[in-house]
């Protein structure tokens, strides 16, 4: 019989991914693209995914036809499972676009306008997730 505890060593929430809904308005081509809730996606080729923070912006995995280098983008990112709910709205310029197979591209975006409080909250969401995983690993190691 398994031992039950109010404070389990392994908490399922530690492994829950941050779910993002990302919408892009390409101001250069006047086109709009939107992702769907990753938990409900039926077409992964249409998804827009956050990959990482870059030195002065973000890197996204997108369908290949969304933008080109030099394009101006308005990006709205909603963290669907954050508490409190986080919404980040930014303007940016495509610095680099790298094809990742026949249907996907890795897009590096230099942020040109954003609210500092929203940006720091978004970064903090990922920092908190990293800290949760670190604490889990430390407890497993017995430190």
Image (cartoon, grey):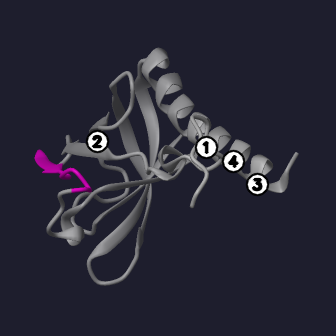
Q: Where is residue 103 shown, x and y percent of the image?
A: 26, 77
Determine the CA span between mark 1 and mark 2. Answer: 44 Å
Residue under the image location 19 percent in, 65 percent down: 46
Instruction: Specify the quadrant of the image occupied by residue 130.
Output: top right
Secondary element under disc 1, as helix, strand or loop, is loop
Residue under the image location 38 percent in, 38 percent down: 92
Mark positioned earlier in the residue sequence (1 or 4) = 1
Mark positioned earlier in the residue sequence (4 or 2) = 2
Q: Which residue is mark 3?
A: 140
Depth-wise, is mark 4 or mark 2 nearer the camera? 4
SS majority, magenta: loop
Label drawn at residue 56: none
Instruction: Specify the quadrant of the image occupied by residue 123.
Output: top right
Residues shaded magenta: 30-39
Vertical placement of 91 versus 2: above or below? Answer: above
Residue under the image location 57 percent in, 35 percent down: 6
Label drawn at residue 136: 4
Determine the CA span between mark 1 and mark 4. Answer: 10 Å
Determine the CA span between mark 4 and mark 2. Answer: 38 Å
Q: Which residue is mark 2?
A: 73
Depth-wise, is mark 1 or mark 2 nearer the camera? 1
Badge 4: how crowded within 10 Å, few (<14), some, or many (20+)?
Answer: some
């Amino acid at each position: 019989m398994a031992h039950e505890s109010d404070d389990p060593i392994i908490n399922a929430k530690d492994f829950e991914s941050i779910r993002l809904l990302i919408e892009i308005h390409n101001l250069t081509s006047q086109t709009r693209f939107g992702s769907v809730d990753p938990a409900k996606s039926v077409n992964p080729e249409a998804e827009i995914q956050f990959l990482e923070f870059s030195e002065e912006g973000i890197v996204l995995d997108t369908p290949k036809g969304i933008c080109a280098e030099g394009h101006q983008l308005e990006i709205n990112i909603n963290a669907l499972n954050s508490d409190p709910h986080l919404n980040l709205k930014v303007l940016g310029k495509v610095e680099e676009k790298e094809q990742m197979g026949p249907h996907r591209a890795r897009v590096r975006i230099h942020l040109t306008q954003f609210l500092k409080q929203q940006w720091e909250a978004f970064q903090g969401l990922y920092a908190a997730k990293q800290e949760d995983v670190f604490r889990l690993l430390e407890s497993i190691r017995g430190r």
